[in-house]
Amino acid sequence: MPLIEPRVLKGFRDFLPPQELARRNMVEKIEKSFRSFGFIPIDTPALEYAEILLGKGGGETEKQIYRFTDHGGRDVALRFDLTVPFARFVAEHRGDLVLPFKRYHIAKVWRGENTQRGRYREFTQCDFDIVGSDGAAADFEILLMIRNTLRPLCGDGVVIRLNHRGLFNRFLSSLGVMEQSAEILRQVDKLAKVGKDGVQKLLEEITGKTESLRILDFVSLEAEGDYETVLEALKAKAGEGEDTRRLEELRRFMKDAGAADGFILDPSITRGLDYYTGVVYETFLTGLPDIGSICSGGRYDNLAGLYSKDKICGVGSSIGLDRLQAALEILDAENAHAGSCCAALACLEAGDAGKAQKAAEAFRLKGITCEVFLEPKKLTQQFMLAEKKGIPWVIIPEDDYSRFTLRNIAARENKESLDVEDAADAMAGM
Amino acid sequence: MPLIEPRVLKGFRDFLPPQELARRNMVEKIEKSFRSFGFIPIDTPALEYAEILLGKGGGETEKQIYRFTDHGGRDVALRFDLTVPFARFVAEHRGDLVLPFKRYHIAKVWRGENTQRGRYREFTQCDFDIVGSDGAAADFEILLMIRNTLRPLCGDGVVIRLNHRGLFNRFLSSLGVMEQSAEILRQVDKLAKVGKDGVQKLLEEITGKTESLRILDFVSLEAEGDYETVLEALKAKAGEGEDTRRLEELRRFMKDAGAADGFILDPSITRGLDYYTGVVYETFLTGLPDIGSICSGGRYDNLAGLYSKDKICGVGSSIGLDRLQAALEILDAENAHAGSCCAALACLEAGDAGKAQKAAEAFRLKGITCEVFLEPKKLTQQFMLAEKKGIPWVIIPEDDYSRFTLRNIAARENKESLDVEDAADAMAGM
């Protein structure tokens, strides 16, 4: 029989051990942070009724979604985000959920996107939301979680730019262009990509020249300075309202929590989705501006309107894990690729596998991850194998596995005749 | 617009917080154990070329697989197991892998199975393999990992029943029925399900009466007693060979490693797949015989034969996570459903959200997961909310968030005027 060529689909990829390990370590830290805030995980099926996922349908989504007819003749599709399944989930399980409900969901999604821009057709999303609370405390918690989850991973260069949809809408109303707000939002969202002049021209087609200039002026106010200054300037242009009071309250919370740095009030942040109704935000790394937002989100007032008459409000955010991982690789290449294993127990004789596992287990119980090498090659070859695998220590048994020589692979040094305790201490001390 | 009914596809399910939390805790422990043995994770796409996944094609797989044509006109399918993608992975990345390669892979798979038997169409597999080593040390490491990973989760009732395909094949040869071995294996594999008499009748149709009785006699030898006794009895029936020597060596390794209990030599274990060529095994819980094998596997000598001329041997196993989770729920219902969060900080005033988060963060830094309640309801209502969510402690701020009253929800007791340190100690002591 002819061989089948081993290959993956265009836009898909394998994760080899170093990348997958880095990804799982990253996810582990994120989850630990989410859980420390009392957020709990859920999961939903990868495959759903197409009707549920497409909702109102139309647009880009319909073109990109993986949709087909299953064995039972059902019109089904792979989820393309975690928001729509979450809306369906909340409508379906409303009675079983204690509100406010704080959940996170880390899972794969699929979009048949154009791959030319380096996009993948399978990627991982990481969503966290509080539903059933419309207070500023909920907005603030999500903002603080972004800061406190990403700073330990990426350093103090994590900056969250926030804005309020209501404020922008009031300003558009005062210009008399509120009817075109969805279109205007979409254009303003392109600011980072196409620049001020580009956006101004796009806006001009929608609103006319005068208004386009005033909108651009409004969304450029961030250049005015710190949060308080920008807020005053915005109030001067759009007047006071619920939205400016919310932005004020959030600022006080930031200060009370000792977390005032790292937040910028930026009226150009609009998030292109008409879904949002309150605060909106994007998160950037000051050292890596080109990478774009690594965590975006906002407040919405009707999560599950397609599936339920109950109006369920909430606030949430989503970390782009693939983007974040790319950023971490640049920021900290060494750590991102560290081997998973601390030590390898050398193989002296094939028939010693039982004793070797017993010794390795003693090290594992001391918290040292310990691989057992399986083949009785020369020690120098086993050292090379450890080096290839990124394992820093090789443990060589002595005296029928009661004492050990410790080989430091990087330093090319041996320490002889250690018991398990001392050997484990020496490795942990590294 | 009419509402869309929120529902999942037949055979699919949502994981609500308690189940998903239990599942993630279980996976975390399994991964930690795998990593302590120096196994590293990989991941592969959910969607692959149908040609790759179906291989030789035909049979049950072809009927159950989710297969469709994508936007680019490609014939694609969702993976139905993790073994086939792993074979493709090894063939494709052979040059980048250091052999022996020890990897694990925990991921969803999809099969359009008949759901009447309580089967799900989406489930999680957890595979771990060593490829590129044909030694008994590799067989033993996988067996030991099963034992050392599952015993901390399920207790000492974890029993691994093993056998060797070569031994059974030699016995069939001696009866002159080796040609029908694949069919015979499939029938013997039904022993637990249809009983001795049932299997004997099925075998009789294939081999005739005399041989069917002798096969049944052979596979029933486990009743003879301990590993050593059964091995002697098998040698008496089938003679000595590579396979009996391998089974002997494995026994010595078990004893050397101090892990002799929990392994049973059982000639009725055949694993219905013709894929296996060496040791094969299944894992049972003595307290829950009806649940079936929770971890099965064996040795194979040609993993990637469909995609590569290189013969790549290996040994591996797969934990059925859904089955294991069901078992854990029965064994330890309380732990399986524990809340994720240790404490909740009561909300005294909506405007205190910043101070509340600051105080909660101080507890988080002490390792106490701490949710912040967002709404200033009566304290009794907040205690009830904590109880509903399975949160054992409520922290009530005093003196402008410098001292705290600790409410033990189960005991309905308060301890007043504690600083962060003392309150954290009191909670950790529980």
Image (cartoon, coloured by chain):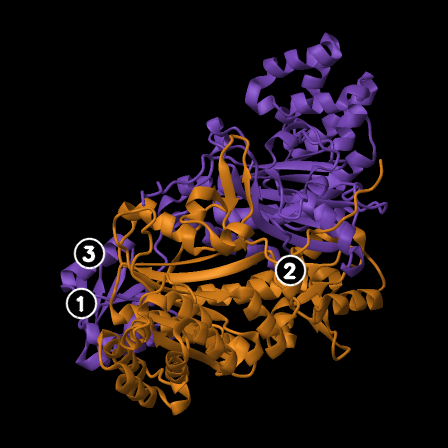
Chain colours: A orange, B purple
Comparing A263 with A367, the one in front is A263
The N terminus of chain A lies in quadrant = top right
> Is A307 left, or right, of A389 in this rendering?
left
Per the model, the C-alpha gap separating discs 2 and 1 is: 49 Å
Q: Where is residue A348 in the image (x, y as percent from the top left)?
A: 80, 59
Q: Is residue B254 visible?
A: no
Q: Which residue is labeled 1 in the image?
A: B376
Disc 2 element: helix
Above or below: residue B287 compared with residue A255: above
Q: Estimate the x, y position of residue A92 in percent, counting from the top left.
A: 33, 44
In three-dimensional space, the C-alpha distance between marks 3 and 1, rounded to whole angstroms, equals 14 Å
Kind of residue at disc 3:
Met
Q: Are marks 3 and 1 in contact (CB under 8 Å)?
A: no
Q: In this rendering, is residue A188 above or below B171?
A: below
Q: Which amino acid does label 1 sit on?
A: Pro
Residue A219 on image: x %, y %: 39, 81
* Label 3 SS: helix
Chain to which mark 3 belongs: B
**Residue found at x 52% / y 28%:** B114
Q: Name the residue under label 3.
A: B384
Closer to the chain start, of discs 3 and 1, is 1
Tell me the mark number nearer the camera, choosing from 2 and 1.
2
Disc number for residue A115: 2
The residues bearing labels 3 and 2 have C-alpha atoms spaced at a distance of 51 Å
Amino acid carrying label 2: it is: Thr
